[in-house]
Image (cartoon, rainbow, N blue to C red):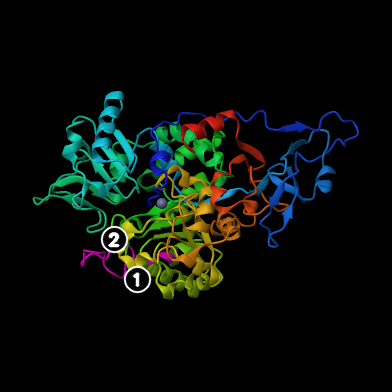
Amino acid sequence: MKALMKQGSSRLTSNKRHSFRAAALAGLCVGLAGCATSLPEQGADKVILNASIYTQDSDLSWAQAMAVEGNQLSYVGDSAGARALIGQNTQVVDLNGQLVLPGFIDTHAHPVMAAGSSAGIEFDLNQTPEVWLKQIKEYADANPDSKGIIGFGFMAAAFGPEGPTKEMLDEIEPNRPIVLMDEGGHSAWVNSKAFELAGIDRNTPDPIPGTHFYKRDDSGEPTGWCLEAMTFMPMMAQLGLVDEASVIDGADDVFYLFSSFGITTIYDAGFSAFADSSYAAIDQLAKDERLPFRLVTSHMIQSPEHLPDAVATLRSYQQRYASELVHPNVMKIHNDGTKEAKTAGQFEHYIGEPENFGSVLLEGEVLQSFVKEVDAAGFDIHIHAIGDRAVDEALDAFEVVRKDNPNSSNRYSIAHTELVRDEDLTRFAELDVAAQTTPAWFATDGEFENQVVGQERAQKLYRFRKIIDAGGKVTFGSDFPATGSLAGLAPIVNLEMGQTRKYPGEREMPITPPVDAQLTLEEMIRGYTIDAAYQLNMESQLGSLEVGKLADFVVINHNLFEMDVYEQHQAKVTLTYMNGQPVFERDLKARFVEWMLDL
Ligand SMILES: [Zn+2]
């Protein structure tokens, strides 16, 4: 999924490779309380002083200090109370008045897949096919020993309705497989060698006709453009282009980015065909203490064929891999496509394509009985739904399960939630279904949307104001790496864009319609913290800074509540704590990375 974040986005997806390692977390601005003999021997492990702490507790109260014992908060309150907890071995952190928020929770991202494919080519979606082809050639020449070539981020629409072709790639590389994913991760551009090694030719049936299919020429020959995940994810796994080793190799660099933006918990929205290698990799990374966040993970349904053993598969991941930092708790149903690919399931047809209403993978009875089965098994459910018909189908299924099992403690959410019919807007509150989305997509000049869904419907995208006003929960995430730009991963940038519905800092830009859909800073923070924790069924441990909760918090150098909204995106995370431990410090190296990435 993606949206264009044009402002500065070519700048933000610059080709400078980010080769860096997690900062050595020494030299924090802390001191041991030390040898002052008047101090008691026993004290808290850490005391945080002189901060502006927005606790996100039920009263939205502010505090000045906190104490940490192990991985939990043992005190939140005023400085005098915290000072009394300083013992001889207490680490004291003076924050000089900086803002502290609960650690950000990204409610839909793909950090593990991003790590696994991070060695590949990174395309700038605003460039042209000529530039991308040149980049592929350079990469192929520079990496003669790689067994294949992967990449991410080209714009399929730049090739016209027929899409890119295998011949363009064959000219560059006839001997090794090439599989390149588009900016939204919903289609891929492959060469003949990839088809040959995967055994795909004109006689191969489409994985899910009409939804996950190979673009073909008049003779039925696949052209090299593969639409939707089931056409290329299993191919990449089969050819070994993403595996356990590539996830482990890419993990430190990619995970560092999340920590540097203050993200301490992530819902990983699915490993697709790479589930076994992905679970094995994160298990290893957790054992090696290389997971700087906690991960709620899923089993991903992308085909009706996945249904019969879905519950058993998710249970087996839970039994094998559940740990302090890894929580395989969610059934993810990938139930429609995107409006960019014109595959999101809509009630009305796409502009200029009277036959095309997109499609919905599981609907009616099939979806409802599957959701019931998953709920009965005790798992949370997350349904990808972008078009209004897909959203409606998901709400119908959740309505059935709510009636059937009113006391269920499982959490239900809909991912992306871009287009919602008027009559469905209040159902999120009624059914206690979280609406998940990415605020970095709210701002647009409308040109693309008008062409795809038409002007009238384009004015009705991302109507979360109405969902919140009806009492519903809205949560935020990045969908990284399908965010549209690296800045879209940053919660602080998203906090601003959710309030403005404009590109960062663009005061003069018109508000992206509907103009009354802007959210408040308080609502934005809520969707990244306590309501996000609720979606993940972890609100008793996460999402606010209260005694007994896990010590996950983020320190920000300016108080967002006192800033002009158009300047908020410039505020920087200076420290990120997860489980009571610092996982990011904005030291010299971090500033260098910001510079490298033009952040
Ligand atoms: Zn996603």
Which label sits in the foreground, 2 or 1?
2
Q: Which residue is mark 1?
A: 364
Task: Please say whether residue 329 is visible from this viewpoint.
Answer: yes
Q: Which residue is mark 2?
A: 452
Q: What residue is at 43 percent from the left and 38 percent from the top?
A: 115
Which residue type carries mark 2?
Val
Q: Secondary structure at mark 1?
A: helix
Q: Quadrant of residue 168?
A: top left
What span is in magenta? Answer: 346-371
Q: From the viewer's perspective, tell me whether residue 468 is left or right of residue 271.
A: right
Find the distance from the CA under tag 2 to the CA under tag 1.
26 Å
Q: What residue is at 68 percent from the left and 32 percent from the top?
A: 28
Q: Quadrant of residue 581?
A: top right
Residue 193 vs residue 132, the one in the foreground: 132
Q: Is residue 202 above or below residue 241?
A: below
Residue 298 drawn in magenta: no
Q: Is residue 346 above or below residue 562?
A: below
Residue farthest toward the front in the current orientation of the protein: 508
Q: From the viewer's perspective, tell me whether residue 393 is left or right of residue 94.
A: left
Q: Is residue 289 above or below residue 55?
A: above
The first of marks 2 and 1 along the sequence is 1
Which residue type carries mark 1?
Gly
Q: Position of residue 62 (x, y in %)?
A: 72, 55
